[in-house]
Image (tube, rainbow, N blue to C red):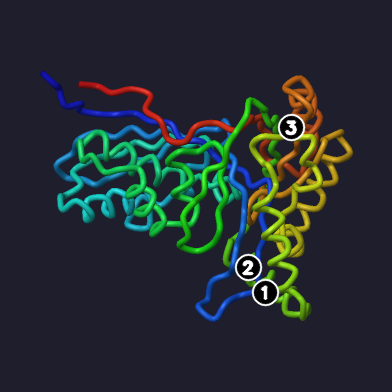
Amino acid sequence: MTITPRSISLQVPAKLNPQLRVGPLREDGYHDITLVYQAISIYDTLHISHNPAGPTITVTGTESERIPTDGRNLVLRAARALAHHVGFEPHVHFDLIKAIPTQAGLGGGSADAAAALVGCNMLLELNVCDDDLMALGANLGEDVPFFIKGMMALGLGHKKPIVSLQTSNYTWNWVLGVPAAGLSTKSVFERFDHILARSPSAGKVYLENRQNCIEVPWGTHHPQHLISQLVNDLEGPSTELLPDIEIALHAGKAAGAVASLMSGSGSTCAFLARDETHARSLMMELQRETVFKDVLMASGPVEGARVLQEMS
């Protein structure tokens, strides 16, 4: 006899973007974007239980006071989207425990939405396939589909499927420096558009960069052989909006990082280390820098949303 679980707990990782390429603003209001995703070992935890009054959510942990618990919350929106897809009422309650810093370019909100899709699908025995979960996630946010499976993937633009990348046994060791101030993605792209408007060849350059990004063997080469490919087109505009990013990147280089780059639209800066021992030394050095409110170690790639426990 199969016993339906009464609750389920999942963990879901943060992400970094080893490369992020952005094209000019299109007529439809979106940008052409090509980027690499890597899931890393900083995790939010999502506990889901049955609740006749649901969907509802409580949030605790890192910067939990910054997370809305009303209709803006991506976890609640994910539950409602899945419910609409299969035709049921989402009678669930979520307990979200945050460890991924907020508004930091690490994908925490998208990760939580992915965990909600995976967890509700399992708890309520809906049997929705991963491809459909990823399609539902894409309507919630560009990054959401990636967190269903995690590891490494290519993102090829608005509403286009995430392409999973083959990975070998290479481990990327990172130290993350989180500046005190965050950045609005909207503001970063507006500044990017302002800068790019000065360049008549922006479209051509983007297409060349896009093709190069697609051809790089991201998951099957040693990280130190890919250092020249660690690029983020949003780093310049983000630095103009928040000069602390430039200070942070210089601090990482001065401390001996193999490479330094900003993640996503900021403001977290990621510093590549040679190995775990080097990462620990780098973290201790960067913890002395006043520009960071938090300095964390992480490694990747890791799996996406996964079940920790089912309670019957």
Spot occupied by residue 210 in the image (x, y as percentages of width and height) = 67, 60
- Horizontal placement of 217 versus 63: left or right? right
Quadrant of the snapshot with the C terminus = top left
Quadrant of the snapshot with the N terminus = top left
Sequence-first disc among 2 and 3: 2
The residue wearing badge 2 is 189
Query: Image point 42% across, 41% down: which residue?
Result: 148
- Identified by mark 3, the residue type is His
Spot occupied by residue 176 in the image (x, y as percentages of width and height) = 69, 38
- Identified by mark 2, the residue type is Phe
The correct choice, above or below, for 208 with respect to 269 in the image is below
Whether the residues at callouts 2 and 1 have beta carbons within 8 Å, the answer is yes
Sequence-first disc among 3 and 1: 1
At numbered mark 3, what does the secondary structure look like: helix, strand or loop? loop
What is the spatial separation of the Cα atoms under label 2 and label 1, in whole angstroms? 6 Å
The residue wearing badge 3 is 222
Q: Nearer the viewer, residue 172 or 5?
A: 172
- Horizontal placement of 219 versus 108: left or right? right
How dense is the environment of label 3, judged by Cα within 10 Å: few (below 14), some, or many (20 and up)?
some
- Tell me, for residue 193, which label it has, or none: 1
At numbered mark 2, what does the secondary structure look like: helix, strand or loop? helix
- Identified by mark 1, the residue type is Asp
The correct choice, above or below, for 58 with respect to 20 in the image is above
The correct choice, above or below, for 270 with respect to 34 in the image is above
Whether the residues at callouts 2 and 3 have beta carbons within 8 Å, the answer is no
Query: Image point 31% across, 39% down: which residue?
Result: 94
